[in-house]
Amino acid sequence: MSEFFPNVPKIQYEGRDSKNPFAFKYYDADRVILGRKMSEHLPFAMAWWHNLCAVGVDMFGSGTTDKTFGAEMGTVEHAKRKVDAAVEFMTKLGIEYYCFHDVDVVPEDPDDINETNRRLDEVTDYILEKTKGTNIKCLWTTCNMFGNPRFMNGAGSTNSADVYCFAAAQLKKALDNAVKLGAKGYVFWGGREGYETLLNTNMALEQENVANLFRMTRDYGRKIGFTGDFYVEPKPKEPMKHQYDFDAATAIGFLRKYGLDKDFKMNIEANHATLAGHTLQHELRVCAVEGMMGSVDANMGDMLLGWDTDQFPTNVYDTTMAMYEIIKAGGLRGGFNFDSKTRRPSNTMEDMFYAYIAGMDTLALGLIKAAEIIEDGRIDRFVAERDASWNTCIGEKIRKHEVTLADCAEYAARMKKPADPGSGHQEYLEGIVNNVLFASK
Ligand code: XLS
Ligand code: CA
Ligand code: CA
């Protein structure tokens, strides 16, 4: 079979001085950082929907990119050519994982879910056949329960029990496919699980129903031998005005309320973090603190735009602080899924490679720099010193619940006035980060 990307060679690591656009400057898969290979720190994944399906349509204009891959769009033949293109693309970049929604891999039959499921069987068989003998595998799968008009009022949070059952049917099939493809995870992104107005919304009922759908999916998955993680992917808004999985803290609280926190972890997307008014680092820190670090949707937003632009991550400062959190939490259970799309005018096949090379290199550089910050030790030392009072006699007693409020007040009365708590030294610490980032070695 002829190649889909004939102008692109296998991408190799050539180092930071290379000017070759088809080479990694920082991602060196076998290089060992803090005792693990870069490829182990950074299990990269390709998002089927952006890379193989999206053609550059936006609200003001039609597609700019040809993703026909030599077949008529919307046919099973085209679905198979996308599999071929995926394998070539991933092999050339050395990417091991892929992620997909059910309707990314097959065209949905508008009238009969049984026909959609038959197509899913055929094309997932084809994925298995084409990836046999390679190291390409499924990171996570998910269902598109937001695009079709039947989901306009939600899927798990819909007002219609019939639509809810339809969502359940898609979930059941997705779990079957997760087991078939050996996926490490299943993602719930609640695109329509929220509301436009509380005037027509019974929030208590809707949240109860969403939890029930999570529970039934978990039970079915475990029954058929799915041993991976279930993930919730928080997002505060878009498409809905308010989405129930607003941010990591909200989603984790929800899972705990319904006793689902053992089977579920978080899938944190950088662009969703900023839409929620947080940094990616903040969302990852919440996951680390709560023991819910799962997987990452690697991308970035634009601070001047208030929506989900899904740009490739090219901001080294952000990836450094993200990798700092991830390394300290012991790594990801999942991987780094490039839920990113090339800009509409970046419309050549080569642009898809430039984008992935830039994204992979930016995460690799973030990893290198985060490891340097940790090895440098000044920031960790400062935080430990800042909190030193919690290791003193009174500090320890408070932490161990050995004193009452009155005991603390008595201690304060004896002191008369507390000692100066000490400077936060923020600018000094920011200077250290810049020093590590930009000191040339
Ligand atoms: C949309 C989400 C979506 C999920 C998977 O904003 O990022 O793509 O990752 O359904
Ligand atoms: Ca995402
Ligand atoms: Ca997104």
Image (cartoon, grey):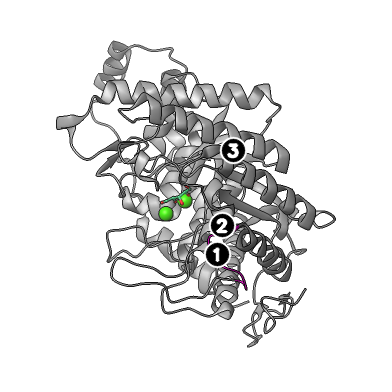
Q: CA distance from mark 2 to mark 3?
A: 16 Å
Q: Judge the density around disc 1: few (<14), some (14-19), many (≥20) Cα neighbours within 10 Å.
A: many
- Residue bearing the label numbered 1: 51
Give the vertical position of 190 relative to 99 (above or below): above
Viewer-closest of 418 and 28: 28
Residue assigned mark 2? 47
Question: Which residue is at a point 24% across and 44% down the rendered structure image?
Answer: 241
Name the amino acid type tagged 1: Asn
Residue type at numbered disc 2: Ala
Mark 2 beta carbon near ligand 1 (under 8 Å):
yes
- Which residue reaches farthest right? 133
Residue at mark 3: 174
Would you say 304 lies left or right of 265 here? Answer: left
Cα gap from disc 3 to disc 1, whole angstroms: 20 Å
Secondary element at tag 2 = strand
Q: Does mark 1's beta carbon lie closer than 8 Å to ligand 1?
A: no
Verify CB contact (< 8 Å) between mark 2 and mark 1. yes
Quarter of the image where the N terminus is located? bottom right
> What segment carries the magenta color?
69-75
Residue 401 position in % (x across, y down):
43, 14
Nearer to us of marks 2 and 3 is 3
